[in-house]
Image (cartoon, rainbow, N blue to C red):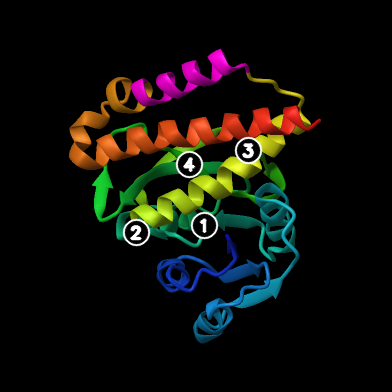
Amino acid sequence: MKLSGVIITYNEARNIGRCLASLQAVCDEILVLDSFSTDTTAEICASFGVRFEQNPFEGHIQQKNEALRRASHPWVLSLDADEALTPELQASILEVKAQSPKKGAFAFNRLTNYCGTWIHHSGWYPDTKLRLASKVDVLWGGINPHDQLLPNEDIKVLHIKGDLLHFSYYTKADHFKQIAYFSKIAANELFVRKVRCSLLKLYMKVAAQFLKSYLLKKGFLDGKAGWLIAVRSAYATQQKYALLRQLWSHA
């Protein structure tokens, strides 16, 4: 069973080394598809001896499908640059390789670090992700920027042990920068799909997002970090639908 590790990047010098180091033990090839980074991402990738290729960025889903297409081996393991395999997850993937299945798909839990705190509630854990699969049996879909690896109907997704570590935000500024970036993409996607949002609906969605994160998903058990996640998730919802309303006002 030959396995290609695939990652898309743009200015990921802070994260990419950790990601690549975790993949070396399990992958027969590592492909980084970069969107013309201006930092030292390319140099770091070169130091690991991985395949480093570049392609213009047209969207997260489009870029990940292009990376999937370029992978050399029949099996793919897809990670984001700010993710890394734990030793337990590495062992589980090596067990799958030892069994050498012809086709299939495997999911595992993702554990997120938020400004130095590991989050075990707030709707952020277990956050199960399908990331390991036979190449011909999956395709990236979803709605940008929230991409999702989707298996063919005849493929059963199995769960394997071990966490995928996700180093999401290092600072408050990182989070708000990402909110601004994702909100714009999400609003544009909703506008293209002709989704509308009244002011009342906007307020209801913001309130619902806070209550879901902090109460329903037990964010209060994550302490101060859980409160901040709930508040900022609600703010992200407000930004997305406010931008959507602006798009409709100029349509």
Mark in front: 3 vs 4:
3
Mark 1 residue element: loop
Disc number placed over residue 170 in the picture, else none: 2
What is the crowding at mark 3: few (fewer than 14 residues within 10 Å), some, or many (at least 20)? many
Of label 1 and label 3, which has the lower sequence position? 1
Number of the front mark, 1 or 3: 3
Q: CA distance from mark 3 to mark 4?
A: 20 Å
Callout 3: helix, strand or loop? helix
Indicate which disc residue 129 carries.
4
- Going from the N terminus, do you reach mark 3 or mark 4 first? 4
Question: Which span is picked out in magenta?
Answer: 198-211
CA–CA distance in space, label 1 to label 2? 16 Å
Label 4: how many Cα within 10 Å (few below 14, some 14–19, many 20+):
some
At label 4, which amino acid type do we have? Lys
Amino acid marked by disc 1: Asp
**Closer to the observer: label 2 or label 4?**
2
**Residue to which mark 1 is pinned:** 80
Work out whether residue 227 or residue 56 is closer to the camera in this orientation and state it.
227
N-terminal-most mark, 1 or 4 = 1
Instruction: Estimate the spatial distance between the alpha carbons at disc 2 and disc 3, rounded to whole Å.
Output: 23 Å
Q: Nearer the viewer, residue 203 or 47?
A: 203
Q: CA distance from mark 1 to mark 4?
A: 12 Å
